[in-house]
């Protein structure tokens, strides 16, 4: 069989399908049971980018079955309106993916792990607190999306003003006006320079998503304005001191940027109740370097492989 299988997972609670790619290890034997790792993509990304073509593919080479999926409302997955980024629904996706995996004869249901990347890392942390079928969790430059949004506004007064705007936009749409979609990034590095952007994370994201380096048709980096209110009031790490007990690995680059993954990584390691937890700091590399650049990815893989081998 091919080393990749494209599947559709029925989202049983919401009546649409989640699109996913399953990566198989070399010499795969469907009569055996394998430890399996789900890899969640960053916000604005898709399964064909770093979560699938880099980390899922490389972990499969190490003997794991891996699955990269498109979030609901995004990529090839179903759900309307498109480009909805709702943390509660993103977390619910993990439960439906687990429902699917435990039906596959070659998946060892007692050895399922989870990796989340960037905003997907915050979602993964939040999900495993209450979805105990995931036995170990890792994040790669993981970020707490609620904190990112709140900090971007600059003050609590600005956050409240944004929520008022979101409410007004939702009212307008309910009365028949068009959806308002926010672009997540400058359209090019040249536009970023024109805007005077110097932050390493925004520049890294623009290079990854808006050039041939990482651009894919479904990696659109668009967010529906009227569906953002939940995220402004959401905290990925809520109750981590009580409910986050699975083995945990947090991987960050040591060049911090505006998205705050470096700080978030230190915070969740400090707060997690997990007895087994490790913070891995990749020296001299930044957030988006960990998406696809050979050296930092190799350093991350050198940690991820034994972590999941030992904990699944």
Image (cartoon, helix red, strand yellow):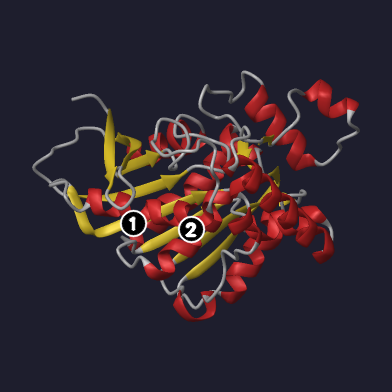
Give the left or right position of residue 127, taking residue 219 as reference: left
Decide: is 38 above or below 215: below
Query: At 33% from the left edge and 42% from the top edge, which residue is drawn?
Result: 66
Q: Pointer 1: what residue?
A: 95
In the image, residue 119 lies at what x, y percent?
58, 50
**Name of the residue lying farthest toward the front:** 175
Q: Which mark is residue 127?
A: none
- Label 2 crowd bin: few (<14), some (14–19), many (20+), radius 10 Å: some
In the image, residue 116 lies at what x, y percent?
49, 51
Quarter of the picture holding the C terminus: bottom left
Q: CA distance from mark 1 to mark 2?
A: 11 Å
For mark 2, give the secondary structure. helix
- Label 1 crowd bin: few (<14), some (14–19), many (20+), radius 10 Å: some
Give the left or right position of residue 287, taking residue 26 as reference: right
Dot in front, 1 or 2: 2
Q: Pointer 2: what residue?
A: 88
Query: At 42% from the left edge and 58% from the top edge, which residue is drawn?
Result: 307
For mark 1, give the secondary structure. helix
Decide: is 294 above or below 10: above
Decide: is 218 above or below 63: above
First-in-chain label (1 vs 2): 2
């Amino acid at each position: 069989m091919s080393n990749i299988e494209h599947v559709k997972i029925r989202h049983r609670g919401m009546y649409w399908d989640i699109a996913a790619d399953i990566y198989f290890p070399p010499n795969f034997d469907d009569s055996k049971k394998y430890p399996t790792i789900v890899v969640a993509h960053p916000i604005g990304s898709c399964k064909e980018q770093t979560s699938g073509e880099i980390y899922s593919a490389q972990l499969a080479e190490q003997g794991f079955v891996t699955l990269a999926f498109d979030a609901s409302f995004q990529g090839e997955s179903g759900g309307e309106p498109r480009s909805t980024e709702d943390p509660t629904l993103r977390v619910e996706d993990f439960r439906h993916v687990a429902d699917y995996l435990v039906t596959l004869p070659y998946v060892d249901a007692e050895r399922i792990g989870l990796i989340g990347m960037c905003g997907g890392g915050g979602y993964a942390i939040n999900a495993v607190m209450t979805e105990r079928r995931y036995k170990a969790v890792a994040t790669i430059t993981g970020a707490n999306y609620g904190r990112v949004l709140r900090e971007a506004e600059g003050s609590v007064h600005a956050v409240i003003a944004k929520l008022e705007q979101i409410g007004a936009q939702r009212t307008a749409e309910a009365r028949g006006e068009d959806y308002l979609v926010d672009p997540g990034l400058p359209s090019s590095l040249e536009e970023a320079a024109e805007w005077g952007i110097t932050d390493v994370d925004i520049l890294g994201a623009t290079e990854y998503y808006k050039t041939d380096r990482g651009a894919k048709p479904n990696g659109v980096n668009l967010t529906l304005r009227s569906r953002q209110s939940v995220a402004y009031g959401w905290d990925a790490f809520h109750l981590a001191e009580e409910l986050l007990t699975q083995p945990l690995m947090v991987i960050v680059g040591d060049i911090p940027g505006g998205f705050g993954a470096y700080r978030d990584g230190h915070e969740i390691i400090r707060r997690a109740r997990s007895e087994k937890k490790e913070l891995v700091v990749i020296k001299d590399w930044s957030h988006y370097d960990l998406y696809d650049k050979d050296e930092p990815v190799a350093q991350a893989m050198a940690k991820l492989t034994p972590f999941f081998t030992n904990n699944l």
